[in-house]
Each structure stands twice: as C-alpha cells, then as structure tokens.
Image (spheres, rainbow, N blue to C red):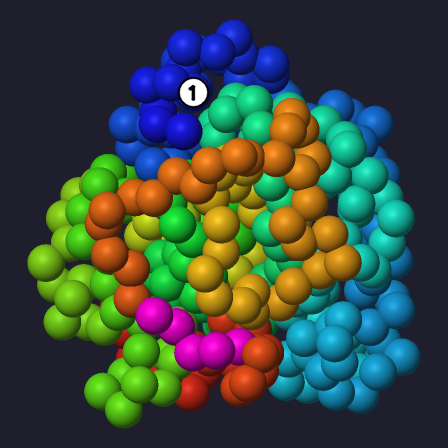
Amino acid sequence: MLPEDILTASARVLNQSDREAYFRDGVVAVDGVIDEGWLARLQAVSEEMVARSGAVAQSTEAFDIGPGHSARVPHLRRLRAAVDQHPDLWTFAGPGPLADIAADLVGPDVKFHSAKLNYKWPGYGEVVKWHQDIPAWPHTNYSPVTLGVYLSDVGPEDGPLVAIAGSHEGELFSHTDTDGGWRGSVTEADMAGVDMDCARPLTGRAGTLVAINCRTLHASGANDSARPRPLLLNVYSSADAFAWMPAPTPTRHTGEIVRGEPARLAHLDPRPCPVPPNWDEVGYGSIFTAQATSPAAAE
C-alpha cells in the first residue's frame, strides 16, 4: 500500500500526527503506547533470557554471545529469532498489541517478518555502525518497518538509536565490500554525503516505541551508563510485500499474516535494491559479527 492510502484508514493505536511524522521522516518515537503490564512481562522475559544465556559458552542459534561472556558476567548481545524462544514474545508480536501498531504504519493487512532482542552492555564500547535494514532482507516494496520497544529507560549515555530523518527517501546504499562480502554497514565515503544535521537521537523511558522504516539510516553509540540497554525489535510489512531473498534469521512465524488478510496482488516498488548474500548458503550471525569484521564506518 502507498502511504497516502494507509493514512486514510483510521488509526488503531498511534495518533495521526505520529503516523504522518513516520512517513515524513522515516522514523518516529512514541511514549505511552505499550501497556505497563506488557512492559513488565517483556522485562521479565528479557531477564530470563540473559540468565539462560549463562549456560552456553559460545554463540548458538538462539544466543549471540559477545567477548568475555560467562555465567557470572553474561554478555548476551542478541536473542535471535526471539519469538521462537519464549511464548510471551510471540503473543506480544503476533496476535498481540504490536500488530495493531504495525497496521497503523503498513496498512490493515500485516505480515510478520522477524524478531530479535538486542542488548548493549556497559563497559564494552560496542557500537552499531550506520546502516539500513532492507539491504539485508529485500522485499518487493519498502513498507517493512521495525518496531522497537525500549525495555529500560534510555538516555543519551545509554547508546540510544540514532536515525537520519528523511533518509528513507534518499539513496539506498550498498552494505557489501568491494569483494561482495557482507559488512552490514555504510562506508565512510557514502556517509560523507549524508546530512548529519538530520541525525535524531531516539531517547525515551522504558516502554517507548521506536518505528524505523526499512530504508532509514540508523546507528547507535556505545553504552556509557552503568546499566544494560535491552531493545526488543520486531519487523512487519504490508501483506502485499514479498521477500525475494531468504531472511537472515527466519522464525517459525516469518511470513504469517498477523492482521487482516493475505494479499492477492504484490505491490512492486520500482526503486531498485542491492542483492544481499544468500543467507541460506552463507549463514548469518548478527549485525555485531558482520560489522566487527568490516572496515570502519562512520558512527
């Protein structure tokens, strides 16, 4: 669906001004739309997953483990395919309240794509370099939206998401190196042409919802606070968007319609998209492992 068509439908959760800001800027942060009961459940699941990760010594299909990890001092960077790891995460993301928010941004017919729970721990200096999401999992159109929920208060010192407002209408950059290897980030040369005056830190208290369009440039700095920063991320698209390459980290629910009806026609956006590696053939760890082995990029 086109933005103008989506905006004509009545909003379910978001204010109309929030929806208009999302389509204008490619990003919006909204406080107060996640129920306090759900926030408490998600925080409990997050703590449980961190505790579970202490039982593994290296990365698994569920846990992406960072340096220095141990049961006593866990360094869980990502819970992969999160909706497969705990029933509450699928209840929230699938038939639950988040699908209504997705419908406000992609239209009444909503398809689920993927989910992860990212952690940024203090003391490691870890950053996420500038990148766009859609080059890793291209679709027939650019409706996919990542809905992030902060599970703790996030201020400037916690390494918040930072997005370039309006960049979703700009260039879609390559995220591979000159040899075609996946680096998961935009080069410094490409970032030199980006208007950094449009960079917007997305801070907020626990329960803040952050919606990022799949073309929007975003990054996050190091966590300089004394507490971890857990961030739950679920990806949705309009039902008429179809993935044309394998998903990097598919879930048991990838491709399911979670609101409305399946599409009878595909919406084909004429703007091109770079072709990523075939993840079924080469495998995918996480953005942390990809960027750790890539040349430096602007943060």
Quadrant of the rendering where the C terminus is positioned: bottom left
Residue 155 screen position, x and y as percent: 50, 43
Q: Quadrant of residue 175?
A: bottom left
Image coordinates of residue 273 in percent, x first then y, are: 29, 59
Q: Is residue 160 left or right of residue 41?
A: left
Q: Give the magenta-colored segment's residue range.
A: 275-279
Q: Can you see residue 200?
A: no
Q: How far across and down, in percent of the image, does residue 32 sit?
A: 62, 21
Q: Residue at x 54, y 68 (%)?
A: 246
| Residue shown at the point (68%, 85%) measured from the top left | 68
- In the image as oriented, which residue stretches furthest toward the front? 264
Q: Where residue 38 sits: x, y (%)? A: 80, 32
**Residue lying at 34% horizontally and 70% vertically, measured from the top left:** 275
Residue 94 visible in image: yes
Crowdedness of circle 1 by 10 Å Cα count: few (<14), some, many (20+)? some
Q: As drawn, is 161 to the left or to the right of 187?
A: right
Callout 1 amino acid? Ile
Q: Main secondary structure of the magenta part?
A: loop
**Camera-nearest residue between 90 and 267:** 267
The residue that label 1 is drawn on is 6
Residue 228 lies, with reference to residue 12, above or below; the image says: below
Asked which quadrant contains residue 64, the reply is bottom right
